[in-house]
Image (spheres, helix red, strand yellow):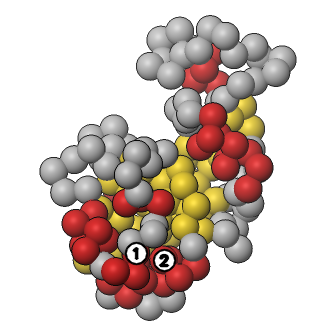
Amino acid sequence: MNYWLMKSEPDEFSIDDLARRPNQTEGWHGIRNYQARNFMRDAMQIGDRVLFYHSSCKVPAVVGIAEIVSDIYPDASAWDPESPYFDPKSPQDSPRWLQRDIRFIKRFTRPVTLSAIKAHPGLADMLLVQKGSRLSIQPVSEAHWQLIHHMAGESL
């Protein structure tokens, strides 16, 4: 099993929004960074676990857990001229942008804030806190996964 961190702005789509979706599942669309897309396409697997991270908000934090529940498939928002993710250069016969479905597992009762992550010496090499790292999807080591759970007061 692999572990991931996936960022979402809570005013756009929060972990609570995911929990309210039918089957608590949603397609993770709108990825427009090639490296993040490649992680989704080449490394993610059904059953992988996700740290759901609220970004670009008052208190950025890991707020819960989700799971990858689908294979990769085309992100149709790239073909919708009304979508903020529209990409007229993405051909339908060879999609440039892809997505996977994620399913809600749980919301942390104690979110793990970005400042707490930055302050923890065991997380100093986590991709999230590396200078210049702005990827919306990034791998997480098993050690970092366990530390985040411990900091949230959650058992594994």
Residue 154 visible to an observer of this rendering: no
Residue drawn at point x = 77 percent, y = 16 percent:
92
Can you name the residue that lies furthest to the front here? Answer: 131
- Badge 1 marks a residue whose secondary structure is helix
Mark 2 or mark 1, which is nearer the start of the sequence?
Answer: 1
The residue indicated by pointer 1 is: 123
The residue indicated by pointer 2 is: 144
Viewer-nearest residue: 139 or 95: 139
- Which circle, 1 or 2, is nearer the viewer? 1
Residue 41 visible to an observer of this rendering: yes
Q: Quadrant of the N terminus?
A: bottom right
Classify residue 114 as left or right of residue 104.
left
- Badge 2 marks a residue whose secondary structure is helix
Q: Amino acid at mark 1?
A: Leu
* Image location (x, y in percent) of residue 61: 29, 62
Classify residue 156 as left or right of residue 76.
left
Q: Is residue 14 positioned above or below 85 on the image? A: below
Can you tell which mark lies on residue 151?
none
Residue drawn at point x = 29 percent, y = 68 percent:
118
Q: Are marks 1 and 2 in contact (CB under 8 Å)?
A: yes
Classify residue 85 as left or right of residue 71.
left
* Image location (x, y in percent) of residue 65: 47, 68
Q: Is residue 82 positioned above or below 22 on the image? A: above
- Compute the Cα span from label 1 to label 2: 6 Å
Viewer-nearest residue: 144 or 85: 144
Q: Is residue 80 positioned above or below 142 on the image? A: above
Q: Splitting the image into 4 quarters, where does residue 138 fall?
A: bottom right
Q: Residues within 10 Å of mark 2 (few under 14, many from 20)?
A: some
